[in-house]
Amino acid sequence: MKRVLAIAVVLLLALGGWWLFHMQVTQPVSPSASEVTEATLKDPALIAKGEYLAAVGDCASCHTERGGVRYAGGRVLPTPFGNIPAPNITPDRETGLGGWSFEDFWQALHSGKGRHGELLYPVFSYTSFTKVTRDDALAIFAYLQSLPATNQAAKPLGLGFPYSVRNSLKAWRALYFQEGEFQPDPTKSDAWNRGAYLVQGLGHCNECHAPRDSLGGSQNKPSLAGGQIPVQNWYAPDLSTQANGGLEGWSEQDIIDLLKNGQSARGAAFGPMAEVVQQSTQHMRDEDLRAIATYLQSLPARVPVPEEKSQLDTRPILAQGAKVYAERCADCHGKDGNGVAGVYPPLNGNSSVNEPSGINAIRVVLLGGFPPVTKGNPRPYSMPPFAQQLNDSDVAAVVTYIRQSWSNHATLVMERDVIKNRHTPID
Amino acid sequence: MKALSAKLRMATRVFGAWTGMLLLLPLASLAQDAPHPDIPDTLRQRIAACTACHGVHGEGTPESGFFPRLAGKPAGYLARQLKDFQEGLRKYGPMEYTVGQLSPEYMHEIAEYFAAQEVPYSRSPLPQLPASTIKRGEELVTHGDPSREIPACASCHGSQLTGVQPDIPGLVGLPYDYISSQLGSWRTKTRATVAPDCMSEIANRLSESDISAVSAWLAGRELPADMHAQQAGSVTPPLHCGVLGDKGDGA
C-alpha cells in the first residue's frame, strides 16, 4: 500500500512539474469591469434566491467555524492529506470576497480556480458545483455579497509536501474533474431533472455518498453507491431505493421525511448527516425535496454483495449479542427491531445498520445522541451512549446481533473494529 | 448523622417512586388513545442521552465524581454550558457530539428540567491536606487575595456559596475532584466561555496549590440548610463577565 502511494506521489510530482510549464496565470476581473452590474447584485429578489440556494448547498457548514460568524470561514476540514481551513466568504475586502467580481466567483465554483487562476483543493467540492447553472451561481454570489463583511483571515493550510504544491492538482483534475454545467435529460420529467440537478450539483451528495480512492477521488460509476468518509469515519450509505440498494424500499415520503424532519419511518439522521439536515435540507422547499426523492428513486438497482460465509462459529457471539440487545436495546427498538413509529427508528432493514463497514452501528451504540432538531421534530427522543457501559466485546456482539437479525444479513463486526472507533474525532 | 441521611434518602426515594406512579396514573388512562402506549411523552424519556450518565434526576455520580451533578444548578448556567459545548468552547468529545444539533429552545428546556430537580447532596472524599492549606482555601473563598487581584468566590457565587439565579452556579456540595479539575480546565483552555471569560482570568491568577486549597475547603464545608441559589441581582460581580451579559463594575 505504501509502495503504491509512493509511486503515485512520484507520478503526481512528475506530472505536476510538466504541467508547471503550461500553467496559465489569470488576472482577477475587477468588480467595475464585471458584466454584472452593482444594481443587479443588490436586487432583493436575487439575494433571497441566493440565500435559499446557499442553504441548499450547505455552504455555511464548511465556511463557518463552530461558534463563529456565519460564512466567515475558519472551520478546518480534515482530509487524509492534511487539514484544509475553509476561507472567509463574507464580502470583506482584505480577508473575504470583498474585491471579487462575479467572474472570479464563477471561476472558483465552476472551474475550481482561485482569482489568480490558482488551482483550488477539491475539498471545496467544485467537482459537484461545476454543475450549478450560471444564474444560480449569480444569485449565491449576490447573497454572499449582501452579508455583513467580517474581517477574519484564513488559517494556515495544514498540508505537507507534496500536497502543498497546488500544481499537483492538475494531474488530479485530469483524473477526477469534469467541468460543465448540468445538462437536463429531455426524456425525463421536470421533477427528475430538478432532483438530479440538486443532488449532483449544489447538494454535492456524491462527495460523501461514494467511495474515495487513495488519491481522494470520488467514484462516480455508479454514483451515490455509498462510501466511508475519510478521517471522519462515518459511512455514508448507498442511496438507491431499488433492489440491493442502501435505501431499498424507501418511499418518496420516507426520503422527504428524513431530509425535512431528520427522521423517517426507515431511520434517523445522525453523525454528519444530522448536521446536513439541520443546516441545509430541512430548509428546502417541499417541491425540491420531492424532486430529490424522484431522482433518488430512479437510481438503478445494485449488484448483490455475495454473502460472506464466516469461518467463525458465530452462535456464541449472537447469543451474547441477543442478551445485550434484550437488556439495553429492546425497550426502545423492540424485540422485532422495528422501533416505535415516529419515536425510535427501526433497526430491521435500516440502511445504517446494514451498511458494509459496520462503523455506523458501532459508533451509534458508543455515542448515542439526538437526531437533529428540526421544525418538524423540535424535541427529538434520544439514545443513551453506551461507551461507558459496554465493553468492546459486548458492543461487537450486540452490533453483530443487530446486523444479522430479522431481515438483516450484514457481516459480523469484531472487537478490533470497536476499539478502532472508540476514539474517533468528533468535529 | 450518616444513618439519618441514609434514611432520609430512602424516604425521598420511596416518596419519589409513589409520586411517580401517581403521576403516571392519568397517563395510563390516556395511553390507549396515544399512538405509542409504551413510550411516555415526557422530556425525561426524550433525554435518555443525558440521563444515561448524569442520572434521571441529574444526580451525577458523586461516588466517582466523573459525571457532574446537574440537579438544582441554575437553568441559565446549565443552558450556557450546553451552548459552550456546542460551540466547542468547552471541550469534551461525548458532550460536544451529543448537543451538536440541538436548538437553543430545546437546550433551555433540558436545562430547566435539571435545574428543577431536588436531589439531596452527598459528601465526597477529601484529600489529606495540611490545616494551613485549608485555612488558605477559606481565606481565598471568603476574602480573595487583593494583592493578586483574586476576588472572593463569595462575591459572585453568593454569601452562602449556593449560587445566584439565573447564571451563577453554587460551589458547595461539589466534589473536590470536580472543582479542582474545572479550575484546571480553565487554565488548559479546555473550558472557556464567551468573552470576557472572568473565570478563566481568575483561574489563571490562582497557583496550583491555591486550586487545591480552594477546592478542598469548598468540598469539605458544612452544607447550608437551604442549598437553593440566591435570588437574581443579589450580587454585584467585581469583574466583567461575558456570561452575565457583561454586567459587573470591573473594579
Image (tube, grey):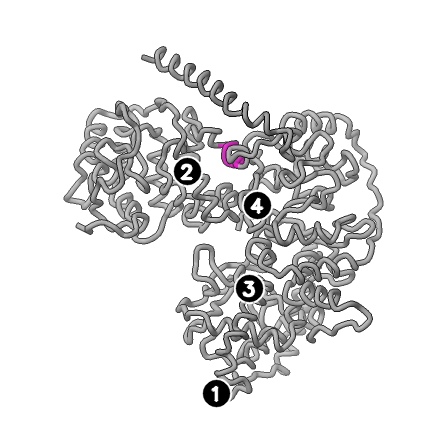
Residue A122, percent from left and from top = 61, 67
Disc 3 target residue? A59
Q: Work out how far the residue at label 4 is from the one at label 2, CA to CA, in angstroms.
A: 32 Å
The residue carrying mark 4 is A424
Mark 1 secondary-structure assignment: helix
Check disc 1: other Cα within 10 Å, few if <14, some if 14-19, many if 20+.
Answer: few
* Element under disc 3: helix
> Nearest the camera: B29 or A376?
B29
Magenta stretch, residue numbers: B47-53
Residue A413 horizontal/vertical position (percent): 71, 38
Quick check: is A210 in the magenta stretch? no
Proximity of marks 4 and 2: CB atoms separated by less than 8 Å: no
The numbered mark at residue B112 is: 2
Name the amino acid, label 2. Answer: Glu
- The quarter in which the N terminus of chain B is drawn is top left
Q: Is residue B249 above or below residue A45?
A: above
Categorize mark 2 by other alpha carbons within 10 Å: few (<14), some (14-19), many (20+). some
Q: Which residue is mark 1?
A: A32
